[in-house]
Amino acid sequence: MTSTAGNLAHEIRRLAAELNELEKRLRTEPEPDLESLNELRHAVDNTRLTAWSVSELMTGKAGRNRHAALALERLRRLDHIILSISRDIEAGAIPADSLELQSLRKSASNLENLLAREPK
């Protein structure tokens, strides 16, 4: 069966309604198993990223470059994550000597070096 824009729009609306219902259930029902919850998180995150990218392409905000739209979304996500990690560090939720924080320091240093370069 071939999909048309109308079918896709209908499917998007149906799925959005189901996700809204699922969100309500997650708030009120007993905890689901962790594996299924992680599967949902990854699927929703990937779908959200793609939907955002398509939206940016449709409105012309990213030109017609899908890669540029995805890169901008990753920057927005990283900014949000950095703010959250900063709060976690300030609250003492992340040990200063953790391997994850050491790895983050290296990654942040690499990113800082790239950001300091002159734009091409």
Image (tube, rainbow, N blue to C red):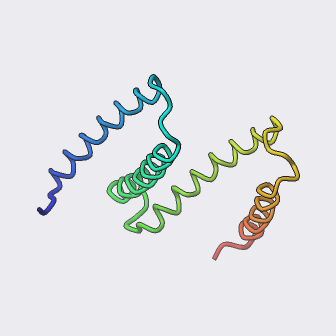
Q: Is residue 72 above or below residue 6?
A: below
Residue 94 in the image, given as x and y percentages of width and height: 80, 44
Above or below: residue 43 compared with residue 31: below
Q: Quadrant of the C terminus?
A: bottom right
Q: Nearer the viewer, residue 57 or 33?
A: 33
Residue closest to the eye, 47 or 63: 47
Image-quadrant location for residue 19: top left
From the top left corner, tell me how far across and down residue 89 is, in percent. 80, 42
Identify which residue is drawn at 82% across, 59% down.
Answer: 102
- Side (left or right) of 8 relative to 54: left
Residue found at x 43% / y 61%: 62
Task: Point out the residue furthest to the bottom here.
Answer: 120
Give the number of callouts. Answer: 0
Depth check: 118 or 37 in front?
37
Q: Nearer the viewer, residue 96 or 113?
A: 96
As drawn, the residue found furthest toward the front would be 33
Q: Position of residue 5 (x, y in %)?
A: 17, 55
**Which residue, as the protein is rendered here, is positioned at the far right?**
97
Report the quarter where the N terminus lies: bottom left
| Image-based side of 24 in relation to 33, left or right | left
